[in-house]
Amino acid sequence: EAQVTQNPRYLITVTGKKLTVTCSQNMNHEYMSWYRQDPGLGLRQIYYSMNVEVTDKGDVPEGYKVSRKEKRNFPLILESPSPNQTSLYFCASSPYFGWWETQYFGPGTRLLVL
Amino acid sequence: QQPVQSPQAVILREGEDAVINCSSSKALYSVHWYRQKHGEAPVFLMILLKGGEQKGHEKISASFNEKKQQSSLYLTASQLSYSGTYFCGTEYDNQGGKLIFGQGTELSVKP
């Protein structure tokens, strides 16, 4: 089944404890992206990747890192999480970024930083 | 700059029409529309490119007004399944990959 998977789906952690949220897609997509969603603010893009080894900052990259060593995986790393990073996180992928293509979202990861 | 969506919320009866607007203060290259149901991931609806034609399916369509830097999503003869939050995502000047979303419009269709 074609899909974007994220792990974990739910995570409670404490301030400063490094964590990684994994994202994987099985559709051979070139483009992948991370978003956070907060009430009243909509979706905000954190980082995106147009292809393997190519990543770039989105609208709210501070406090996050990403890597794209293989086409299928795009992990999101929080080196030192803080409470303001409590949010719902979505990973997404598309064949290419362009006007004729869709973007498929993963199921989301709900993160609580205490 | 985040695009501005209007209205913020709308309540409809089944069969009624609705228009959701997405306005930008900067020149738009493309606009992406998504719908998200409560507790679920956003689902793609359509993309409109600057200079492109109005797109859509039978009852959900969208337009792109370059002069106003605005896109509008049209939902006609609404169904209960249309309920959800609608987001527009904007790309500026072919920045290739960077998407900025509006704050969302909550649509509720009642029987």
Image: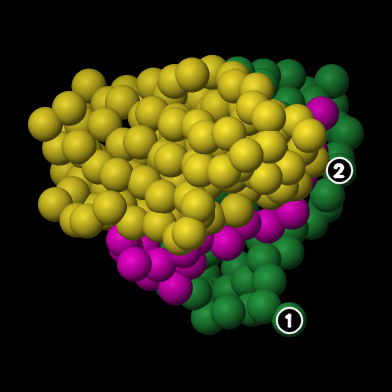
Chain colours: A green, B yellow
| Image mark for residue B29 | none
Name the residue tied to disc 2: A10
Q: Residues within 10 Å of mark 1 (few under 14, many from 20)?
A: few
Q: Residues within 10 Å of mark 2 (few under 14, many from 20)?
A: few
Percent position of residue A2, x then y: 67, 78
Mark 1: secondary structure: loop
Q: Residue at x 29, y 44 (%)?
A: B63
Q: Quadrant of residue B15?
A: top right
The subunit letter for the residue under badge 1 reads A
Q: Main secondary structure of the magenta part?
A: loop
Whether residue B12 is visible, yes or no, is yes
| Horizontal relation, residue B63 to residue A40: left or right | left
| Horizontal relation, residue B50 to residue A55: left or right | left
Q: Nearer the viewer, residue A50 or B49?
A: B49
B55 in relation to A44, above or below: below
The amino acid beneath tag 1 is: Glu
Percent position of residue A59, x then y: 41, 33
- Residue A103: say if magenta: yes
The subunit letter for the residue under badge 2 reads A
Residue numbers of the magenta segment: A94-112
Give the mark nearer the N terminus: 2 vs 1: 1
Percent position of residue A28, x then y: 53, 81
Name the residue tied to disc 1: A1
Q: Residue at x 25, y 42 (%)?
A: B64
- Residue B42: say if magenta: no
The amino acid beneath tag 2 is: Tyr
Quadrant where the C terminus of chain B lies?
A: top right
Q: Nearer the viewer, residue B94 or B65?
A: B65
CA gap, disc 2 and disc 1: 23 Å
